[in-house]
Amino acid sequence: MTQQNQTFALLPEDSSKPLNPRPAGPRPGQRRKPMKSPKPQREKGSKRKTVLLTILIVIVIAGILCTAGYFIKRLIDSKYFFCKRSVRFIPIDKACDGNNDCTGGEDEITCVSEFKVNTTHPVRLTSVQRILQVYSPGLGWRSVCSDDWTPQHAQTACKQLGYTNKPYSTSVQVVNIMSSLKSGPFAAVRAGTASTPTHQATTDRNVCKSGSVVSLTCSDCGEVVTKGRIVGGTDAAIENWPWQVSLQQGGQHTCGGALVSDRWVVTAAHCFSGSKKELSRWRVVSGQTYMKTLGGSYVDRVILNGDYNPARNDYDIALIRLSSPITVRETSKPVCLPPNALDLASGASMVVTGWGYQEEDGDVSPTLQKAHIPLIDRKTCSSPSVYGSSITKKMLCAGYLEGGVDACQGDSGGPLVHFSSSRWNLIGVVSWGVGCARENRPGVYCKVEEMLNWINTVIEKTP
Ligand code: 4AZ
């Protein structure tokens, strides 16, 4: 027991209350018990900050990991083909090399193919007026009379030319057509043949009863809303060249190309050399002025011209079929295939477009470029001071002999177009040249007119 206790016990009850009560609070020597009051605002804020910082760090790390993963995947994709069934990688140049390197041969399934055409596609459009002609082996080409012609016949003929979109036909008086066609021969459709292939639906005529022949347009191709490196070119907007596409392999711009319908792209055969024959890594990006490397259409067929000669760059043309059709809009729409015998004069004004090098040892351009260049006649281009015997019937030249403006690496496969009868026509496909924009070394293009038979046959016959 303590002394203090004894003292209190002796005091009367009242006397335990001090006369002058001390203010409530700790007695001297006694500590105040911490109050259970709400936490200060500052403490709350700093906790929230810590949480936010943690989230931010997690997001940044995830971002870094994703980006690293993306680049690692791109790197692996550019060097290896993944065999899904046997779960292993093989070097990319072993894919599509003619040997089954994956079990089940899955490395040889989605590959570039070749197609040679020895037959004559029996329907064509001729001259700037797009006069419909049909072919039969004994009789050759005959212009189709407007006699008994119906919109259904136009639909059938366009389908034979690979188009299903907006067929449109008009009549042109025989007296107004190209002189070599005026004297015939002609052919006219028989009654009740609207869905028979056009060349089988016609009979011969020496003259057209109606005095006119059919002019046909098969799609809303080659029309743009407004009219508007390539070395020495200028910036271009895709709306003015909406058929231009970027062909990308493993996310890298490799070649240009031109939409000729909502599902088919014309490009150069040399874009698919070496390890570029496997289709799953190709994408076709359309509708972009500033090249982007994400997205794009998948490819289900690449068909090289079977006569393509890599040593000479002869027949340097290929067709790509997209896995699904693009939506035609202001920024993505096809260019027209040219008619036969368009007969462009030397010096005719052409436009070449692309994201290719802006100088010989340069880099691809981030924005689409265009260059206006004149057509160079065959004789000049085949002269010893230019390209001599390297120029074949399947090639054409365009540019300036003094140099300065030209297509270049990365523009390959892209379009050379010409505007006639209110539409843009695909005249050439960027193919080759010695350097870029050099004196006496103009750009050489695959001549599309010479490839129409091949293009129409491939598009019609591809299952
Ligand atoms: C190329 O390497 C290439 N100057 C394309 C076009 C031209 C030259 C080279 C024409 O793809």
Image: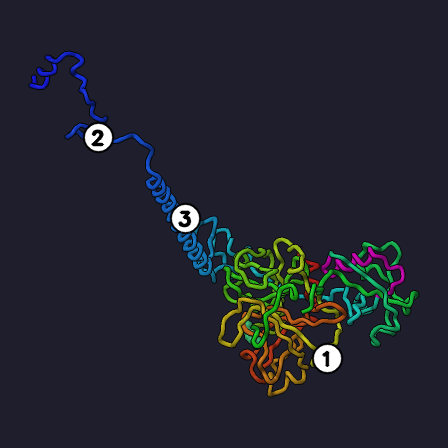
Mark 3: amino acid: Ile
Q: Determine which quarter of the picture holds residue 234.
A: bottom right
Check mark 3 vs ligand 1: CB closer than 8 Å? yes or no.
no
- SS state under label 3: helix
Q: What residue type is disc 2 on? A: Arg
**Which disc, if any, is residue 345?**
1
**Tag 2: Cα neighbours inside 10 Å, few (<14), some, or many (≥20)?**
few
Mark 3 surroundings within 10 Å by alpha-carbon count, few (fewer than 14), some (14 through 19), many (20 or more): few
Residue bearing mark 3: 59
Residue 442 percent across, percent down from the top left: 60, 80
Mark 1 or mark 2: which comes first in sequence?
2
Q: Is residue 1 above or below residue 325?
A: above
Q: Earlier in the sequence, mark 3 or mark 2?
A: 2
Closer to the eye: label 1 or 3: 3
Quarter of the image where one finds residue 228: bottom right
Task: Decide: is 252 above or below 441.
Answer: above
Mark sitting earlier along the chain (1/3)? 3
Q: CA distance from mark 1 to mark 2?
A: 105 Å
Q: Is residue 462 above or below residue 180?
A: above
Give the crowd class for mark 1: few <14, some 14-19, many >=20 residues within 10 Å.
few
Instruction: Answer left or right for 446 relative to 211.
Output: left
Q: Quadrant of the C terminus?
A: bottom right
> Bounds of the magenta span?
144-163
Determine the CA span between mark 3 and mark 2: 46 Å
